């Protein structure tokens, strides 16, 4: 019996070690909104001054179908400049919050606070100073998503598309270049310009920024390995119970 118990303990330790090790085994999933503009310059552009004070954009949950069941960890949100501009600058006093919205596209409120859910996560704090490089490559290659805001290796916002649409809330996005954009069929954003600096609300707009989302998710093989390990553990425990049964008084 002592031998079986020792084997059980050793197997348990091995499995636990495997679980911790697999926590670092992740793969990257990138989602571009809208997907048809992933490698194509958008049909329109916008001047950041039009919404540099406060800006919200809603992204439908259906956009994130590449994520596995249960979602993934959102690590980075990025925009891109319009062709053929580009350059270097520091993003100062820019804050970004992400949340599952209370509303869907077409039903956004012009009041910023009304659109934010209870799980709001501060992706970028406005006190951070971030150096950005969104240099346009050439006239035939879409600019990279150089206006990128991300978090550290151990941080991020867990987004599960089954819980609702994703809202990105940006404040102080004051960059000196035109940003790549597109126009939807219904209101997808709330804009606030410098002229309405003290207002708690903005204006609804059907124009949105072309956006890249960078997620990390566990490798599929890790889950399968874990399932096999847990199965072996259960079989070991079952065998241990069978060995005990003849010694149990009737």
Image: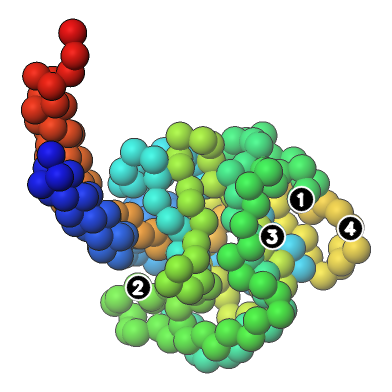
Please tell me in which quadrant of the rendered image residue 32 appears: bottom left
Against 132, is 167 above or below? Answer: above
Please tell me in which quadrant of the rendered image residue 19 appears: bottom left
Tag 4's secondary structure? loop
- Say which label, 3 or 1, has the lower sequence index: 3
Q: Which residue is mark 4?
A: 199
Tell me how far mark 3 sits from mark 2, CA to CA.
Answer: 24 Å
- Say which label, 2 or 4, has the lower sequence index: 2
* Label annotation for residue 104: none
- Say which label, 3 or 2, has the lower sequence index: 3
Tell me how far mark 2 sits from mark 1, CA to CA.
Answer: 32 Å
Tag 2's secondary structure? loop
Q: Which residue is mark 3?
A: 55
Relative depth, front residue between 30 and 242 = 242
Tag 3's secondary structure? strand
Residue at the spot 89% in from the left edge and 58% down from the top edge: 199
- Say which label, 1 or 4, has the lower sequence index: 1
3 and 1 marks in contact (CB < 8 Å): no
Relative depth, front residue between 236 and 30 = 236
Kindly report which numbered mark, 2 or 4, lies closer to the viewer in this rendering.
4
Tell me how far mark 2 sits from mark 4, CA to CA.
Answer: 36 Å
Q: Which residue is mark 1?
A: 112
- Say which label, 3 or 4, has the lower sequence index: 3
- Say which label, 2 or 1, has the lower sequence index: 1
């Amino acid at each position: 019996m002592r031998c079986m118990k020792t084997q059980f303990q050793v197997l348990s330790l091995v499995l636990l070690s495997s679980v911790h090790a697999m926590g670092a085994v992740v793969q990257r999933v990138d989602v571009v909104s809208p997907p048809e503009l992933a490698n194509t310059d958008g049909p329109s552009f916008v001047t950041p001054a039009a919404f540099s004070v406060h800006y919200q954009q809603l992204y439908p949950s259906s956009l994130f179908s590449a994520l596995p069941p249960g979602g993934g960890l959102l690590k980075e949100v990025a925009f891109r400049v319009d062709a053929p501009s580009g350059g270097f600058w520091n993003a100062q006093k820019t804050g970004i919050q992400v949340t599952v919205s209370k509303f869907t596209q077409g039903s956004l409120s012009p009041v910023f606070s009304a659109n934010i859910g209870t799980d709001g996560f501060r992706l970028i704090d406005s006190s951070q100073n971030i150096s950005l490089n969104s240099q346009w490559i050439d006239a035939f290659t879409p600019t990279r998503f150089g206006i990128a805001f991300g978090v550290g290796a151990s941080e991020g916002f867990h987004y599960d598309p089954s819980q609702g649409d994703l809202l990105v809330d940006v404040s102080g996005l004051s960059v000196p270049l035109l940003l790549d954009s597109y126009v939807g069929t219904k209101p997808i954003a709330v804009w606030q310009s410098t002229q309405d600096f003290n207002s708690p609300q903005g204006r609804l707009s059907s124009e949105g920024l072309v956006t890249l989302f960078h997620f990390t998710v566990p490798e599929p093989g890790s889950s399968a390995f874990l399932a096999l390990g847990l199965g072996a553990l259960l079989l070991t425990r079952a065998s241990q119970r069978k060995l005990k049964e003849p010694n149990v008084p009737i």
